[in-house]
Image (cartoon, helix red, strand yellow):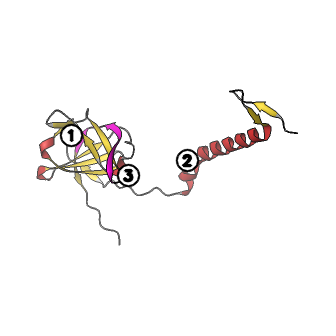
Amino acid sequence: MVRLILDQKGLVMPAHRRLIAAGLFATGTALFAFQSLALAEGETPKPSRVPPAEVVGEPVSCINLAQIRDSQVRDSKTIDFMMAGGKVFRNELPQQCGTLGFDRAFTYSTSLTQLCNVDIITVLQNVGGGLNRGASCGLGQFTPVKLIKQPKAK
């Protein structure tokens, strides 16, 4: 005998399908809950793509746009700005910024001659050979650093 139960919308759902749905939900919830435990116990963390750096001055709120020579996205939260004269400013975003670490490209818009910690960057995603706008994120303070060269692993 198949017993029919009405769901919230008044639709008929057989009891055995409800049991299957409940079991799938419980399994998914358990897997999600125990995922962090498995990662904490079994896996070693991936090495960081953020090169070590020595802080060489006080953080500043803005950097001069005309002085920026290059920017290197290190991960979804860290960008190094290479400046004229060899200076490097590291910006640690206050929060993870979507796929920034994967796409490694961003754009910004400012009406000033400076890029500041109140400005917003937007991730550029390469989709099918074209660029799409992704997540938008706020910048942090710009900290002057000296990148520490790591010996190459053999």
The quarter of the image holding the C terminus is bottom left
Q: Which residue is mark 3?
A: 102
Residue 133 figure quarter: top left
Residue 19 figure quarter: top right
* Residue type, numbered disc 3: Phe
In this picture, residue 137 sits left or right of residue 80: right
Q: Which residue is mark 2?
A: 36
Q: Which mark is residue 116?
A: none
Tell me where the magenta segment starts and ends, as one range: 128-143
Q: Which mark is residue 58?
A: 1
Q: Main secondary structure of the magenta part?
A: strand
In this picture, residue 45 sits left or right of residue 74: right
Q: Nearer the viewer, mark 3 or mark 1?
A: 3
Residue 140 percent coordinates (x, y): 29, 38
Nearest to N terminus: mark 2 or mark 1: 2
Q: Are the residues tagged 3 and 1 within 8 Å (C-beta)?
A: no
The quarter of the image holding the N terminus is top right
* Residue type, numbered disc 2: Ser
